Amino acid sequence: MLSLVDTQPTRIHFGSKFITFAYGDDQQVGGVMTCVYSPFDGRGWRAVRFIRVLSETPGVLASELIAERALTLDEIAHFERLLQVVE
């Protein structure tokens, strides 16, 4: 996965336990999306890359994991700054 320093997310989702910073297109089959999750349940910052696939339910898209990694110190600092701006 590429560095996420100085990037702007395409969407930000505020969940009950964590905030998700999303990058990419998740609306079509084959669309690749990277999500950065803020720390929750003892987990640190992490980046997860997905590809959209068809589910067994006709017309419904699902996500398949491609890769997952912890964020670098520079990336953590970047997303902590973003949190201050969006909260």
Image (spheres, rainbow, N blue to C red):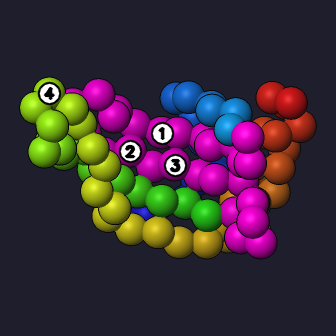
Which of the 4 quarters of the picture holds residue 9? top right
Residue at 83% across, 50% down: 80
User: What residue sits right under mark 1 in the picture?
Assistant: 23
Q: Which of label 1 and label 4 is nearer to you?
A: 4
Where disc 4 sits, the SS reads loop
Q: Residues within 10 Å of mark 3 (few under 14, many from 20)?
A: many
User: What residue sits right under mark 3 in the picture?
Assistant: 35
Q: Residues within 10 Å of mark 2 (few under 14, many from 20)?
A: many
Distance from the alpha carbon under mark 1 to that under mark 4 = 23 Å
| Magenta extent | 16-45
Residue type, label 3: Cys
When the figure is inspected, residue 83 is found, relative to residue 69, above or below; the finding is: above
Q: Kindly check if marks 4 and 3 are in contact, taking CB atoms under 8 A apart as contact.
A: no
Where disc 1 sits, the SS reads strand
Q: Nearer the viewer, residue 72 or 68?
A: 68
Residue at 13% across, 45% down: 56
**Direction from residue 59 to residue 25 in the image, left or right:** right
The quarter of the rendered structure image containing the N terminus is: bottom left
The quarter of the rendered structure image containing the C terminus is: top right
Is there any visible trace of residue 74 in the rendered image?
A: no
Distance from the alpha carbon under mark 4 to that under mark 2 = 19 Å
Residue at 62% across, 31% down: 12
User: What residue sits right under mark 4 in the picture?
Assistant: 59
